[in-house]
Image (cartoon, grey):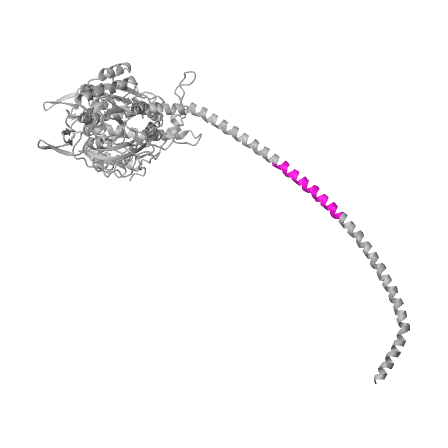
Amino acid sequence: MDPLRRSPSPCSSSRPSSPSTPACEMFGPIGIEAVLGQLKIKAMKMGFEFNIMVVGQSGLGKSTMVNTLFKSKVWKSNPPGLGLPTPQTLQLHSVTHVIEEKGVKLKLTVTDTPGFGDQINNDNWDPILGYINEQYERYLQEEILITRRHHIPDTRVHCCVYFVPPTGHCLRPLDIEFLQRLCRTVNVVPVIARADSLTMEEREAFRHRIQKNLRTHCIDVYPQKCFDEDINDKILNSKLRDRIPFAVVGADREHLVNGRCVLGRKTKWGIIEVENMAHCEFPLLRDLLIRSHLQDLKDITHNVHYENYRVIRLNESHLLPRGPGWVNLDPASPGQLTSRRPFKVCRGAHDVSEDEF
Amino acid sequence: MASSEVARHLKRENIRSLTMSGHVGFESLPDQLVNRSIQQGFCFNILCVGETGIGKSTLINTLFNTNFEDHESSHFCPDVKLKAQTYELQESNVRLKLTIVNTVGFGDQINKEESYQPIVDYIDAQFEAYLQEELKIKRSLFTYHDSRIHVCLYFISPTGHSLKTLDLLTMKNLDSKVNIIPVIAKADTVSKTELQKFKIKLMSELVSNGVQIYQFPTDDDTSAKINAAMNEQLPFAVVGSMDEVKVGNKMVKARQYPWGVVQVENENHCDFVKLREMLICTNMEDLREQTHTRHYELYRRCKLEEMGFTDVGPENKPVSLQETYEAKRHEFHGECQRKEEEMKQMFVQRVKEKEAMLKEAERELQAKFEHLERLHQEERMKLEEKRRLLEEEIIAFSKKKATTEICHNQSFLATGRNLWKDKDRKNSNFL
């Protein structure tokens, strides 16, 4: 079970926390359910925020993938890297959009990393980790203000999609190094890019090898096993974990197939349909990122990764003994943070039997 | 409205809107959010303030359609105490952790000056506990049992005249800390016409005294109209009852009198249904949000400022918590050093004094000793003298004794032979 799961300790004797609260039977419905509707209204009014980062070598189709995911031209101009010379250093390129669907507003921020893995010496991943930590830092600074804003703008990276080149062999040292570092600070979803260059059997073999690599190097990708809350989650997530990394193909052009207009890549030997599960696993990725696990990604970022960062930051200035009321902050350099191994704060799991409430 | 606000905000941030060419699927986002909330469960805390016997427990029972607690409270408490009970309710798939806080002994004392203070202290204590948790380094806010009071139901006695001073005083002290919803209790003792006048009187008194009661939010289209109408009807006149009475061919919750039956859920008889609607069905989430974003933030700001933290320094430059903290720490250290020095000095002083004292005592003792020794010496000499004299006497005496003995011996020798002869004759006579 989760070692950090503990009942909230009463801070003063006047707190009404009793370890065993009696369950009361109501004689009839009174309308508590309506609070769900209230929540929905509030959420629709406020809108949602989602920040995604795509990491991978140039030419793997990251920008196309983003366009396919959100069915629009996310990048204003041509996708960076297309026809342009590869950047000399690792850069970060962010763009923000607001998209709306059926009354739900989503503020989407996509961060691209052109230049990753393209240089001769590729051990400089500080800009990426620095960027992620900088977003955490920004949130932390807002949170500790005396007069806080009503709603703190959330720029923290919720999900990082890591594109693995379709070599068919196994994860490369660069991949392993980077994934190890990245997994500790952000939710990582690895995908096999340009999967149309692999046959089905090659795909399966590649996938298994990657999974083995991940296990050997203790790389914990999303969905993490330790955060499965109940049995339903476990079942659902195990199914997903079997298929990670997804083999995806991106396309932003439409073609006519059997009278239907589908997104796909047209080649001389056929049209690869992006949304066809038989051709590639793009629908799985889309469902994971958007339709079913978006809120979960945000939750884990907020409750686990951000809290981990916060603990490290607050522990960093070792000036005076820490007490519950004191907040120590030091302007820290990103290098200092990435060299540490943050301990994992496991999210408390809720039991079906609420014996703690 | 809200959407134009968002649009303006976006323009400022140079974010453009994107149109999608197909169905992406994130309209399920609110549902995902709701699912997560269902998993976590909801928390709602109600504080009931009112005199003993005014019907607080009965109203809560009726509101939540269950029997929470049975016994009546006593009227003889020396001061106001707050009693909190937590219950778990479940309706279909929604779990609600409900905490009811009752004021015991409110309005019973003879001197009611301090009656409101325990209530204010309790509310502050819950905020404090949350603040402590939030400031911890290793915190777990998502499993924290939120005990902050979300709404305060203030029960007004149905006198029909006006607010009591105690009510005004208490509400004035609570309005910046908690959402207050005033209700007129035992409303079946007030007639309809009196009720209308009473309500108007109450509201005008509250307004003229600057008491901020909770206003149902009117900024959202779906509930604006109904909320606005309800705002007009405050304070709600309520009747509570868990007893069932047969009216027509249904069993309804009501109070039976010889002159009629007061039905709790009949809108013509009392405003109970309106209260339940507003409290639970329409505005529960807003009450929680107001508590968190307004009342709690106010408390937090005041508390942190009290501790000496500011966002802006003396020259209006933004000051980080770090700098303030460093400054305070320096101060504290300086203070500690100073105290330490002081104590050291005091210690040295004391030691000196003690040493002097001891030396003095030593000297005295020495003097005494010498004096005694002298006396002893004199005594001894005297005794020596006496001894000498005595010895001389002894010698003289023994000389005398010796000469007398010699004389005596001589005379004895001379007369001794005669004696012997006499003795022999005597002895021979016998024989």
Position of residue A158 measured from the top left corner of the image (x, y, whole percent): 28, 27
* SS majority, magenta: helix
Q: Is residue A116 magenta?
A: no
Position of residue B291 measured from the top left corner of the image (x, y, whole percent): 28, 25
Q: Describe residue B396's horizontal placement relative to residue B178 as left or right.
A: right
Q: Nearer the viewer, residue A233 or B74?
A: B74
Quadrant into which the N terminus of chain A falls: top left
Q: Residue at x 86, y 64 (%)?
A: B402
> Residue at the right extreme?
B414
In which quarter of the view is residue A64 placed? Answer: top left
Quadrant into which the C terminus of chain A falls: top left
> Residue at the left extreme?
B249
Position of residue B152 measured from the top left corner of the image (x, y, whole percent): 27, 27
Q: Describe residue A244's horizontal placement relative to residue B351 as left or right.
A: left
Q: Which residues are magenta?
A: B354-377
Position of residue B1 measured from the top left corner of the image (x, y, whole percent): 22, 16
Observer able to see residue A197: no
In which quarter of the view is residue A169 placed? Answer: top left
Q: Is residue B374 magenta?
A: yes
Q: Residue at x 59, y 34 (%)?
A: B350
Q: Nearer the viewer, residue B135 or B112?
A: B112
Q: Nearer the viewer, residue B379 or A175?
A: B379
